[in-house]
Structure formats: structure tokens, C-alpha cells
């Protein structure tokens, strides 16, 4: 069995229009949300043994604020990636419990592509900042991952947290 935590980066700061998109940091709300998501992951015993993270500043900051033990593997290919590119990256994963941090619209498309049935959550289709899907796959190796094979264990947004 393999488990995926598929997370969109937390809320980013649009305050400096001179910054390139990839260099935008988190805003205060995003910092709080990422910290809360990390706390939730730890209390749920969802400590990834591998982290696949977009190279953008906001995904890296989200990852740092999660305060997880695994060091992130940064991937330029995950920056604004479409679902097919995310699938390619995930199929190369080696961990049993993998966290992938990315961006919309690709991450919403990827989440929908992966699961056999979507969760009963009003925000699944638009995958807002900080949205997190936990899905399990009955495979021994990520290279065998097929679309539509995932079972949703949990889907939440930062607003769902206490």
C-alpha cells in the first residue's frame, strides 16, 4: 500500500507586484494555515517519508511551516505543473507515505484524476490554498500508479481545522 498527501501551497502574498510569480512568499494567513496543517498531519500520524515539493517560494515556505521530519525534494517540474506532469513525478517516488506540494489548477485536476470517487466536500473541485487530500493506493510501487485507483481517506481545507 502507498499513501499520498496531496497539498496545495498555503495562501501567498500578492503585495509586491515586482516579484515574479515563483518568488511570492506566504502571507500571514498562509503562514498560520501551513502551521495548522502541519500540526494536524502530526496528530493524525501522517508523517511522510518523502516530500515532493515545487521549487516555488510559497510551496517551500508551506513545507517548512509544516515542521515535518523529511527533507523536501524540490522539483522545478512541479511549479505550475499540469496533472500529467504531476503523475510523472509521483511515479518516480520511492516513499511509502509521500507528500506532494503543488499549485492550482494542476493540483485540482491531479486530485480528481487520481481518485476512484471524489470526497463529499464542497471545495474539492476548486482545491483552495492549503487544501489537502489523503489517498491510499493498493500498489507496491509508485511506478504502477494508475488514474482512478485511489481511495480517499480524508480531504480538508485549513478552514476545516479547529
Image (cartoon, rainbow, N blue to C red):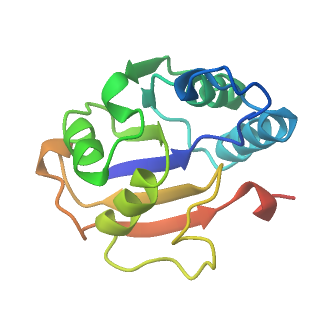
Residue 37 against residue 113 in the figure, above or below:
above
Seen as rendered, the residue at the extreme front is: 18
35 vs 126, nearest the viewer: 126
Q: Is 33 situated left or right of 102 in this image?
A: right
67 vs 110, nearest the viewer: 110
Q: Can residue 101 be seen?
A: yes
Residue at image coords 54%, 47%: 7
Residue 136 against residue 44 in the figure, above or below:
below
Q: Is 85 situated left or right of 118 in this image?
A: left
Residue at image coords 71%, 44%: 37
Residue 69 % position (x, y): 58, 21
Residue 32 % position (x, y): 84, 38
The quadrant the C terminus occupies is bottom right
Residue 87 % position (x, y): 24, 47
Q: Can residue 1 be seen?
A: no
Residue at image coords 59%, 20%: 23
Residue 28 against residue 141 in the figure, above or below:
above
Amino acid at each position: 500500500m502507498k499513501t499520498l498527501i496531496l497539498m496545495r501551497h498555503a495562501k501567498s502574498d500578492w503585495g509586491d507586484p515586482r516579484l515574479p510569480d515563483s518568488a511570492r512568499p506566504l502571507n500571514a494567513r498562509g503562514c498560520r494555515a501551513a502551521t495548522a496543517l502541519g500540526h494536524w498531519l502530526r496528530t493524525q500520524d501522517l508523517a511522510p517519508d518523502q516530500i515532493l515539493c515545487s521549487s516555488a517560494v510559497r510551496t517551500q515556505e508551506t513545507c517548512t511551516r509544516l515542521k515535518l521530519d523529511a527533507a523536501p525534494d524540490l522539483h522545478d517540474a512541479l511549479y505550475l505543473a499540469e496533472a500529467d506532469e504531476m503523475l510523472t513525478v509521483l511515479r518516480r517516488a520511492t516513499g511509502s507515505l509521500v507528500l506532494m506540494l503543488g499549485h492550482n489548477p494542476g493540483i485540482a485536476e491531479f486530485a480528481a484524476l487520481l481518485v476512484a470517487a471524489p470526497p463529499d466536500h464542497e471545495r474539492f473541485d476548486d482545491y483552495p490554498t492549503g487544501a489537502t487530500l489523503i489517498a491510499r493506493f493498493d500498489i507496491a510501487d509508485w511506478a504502477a500508479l494508475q488514474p482512478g485507483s485511489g481511495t480517499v481517506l480524508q480531504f480538508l481545507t485549513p478552514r476545516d481545522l479547529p
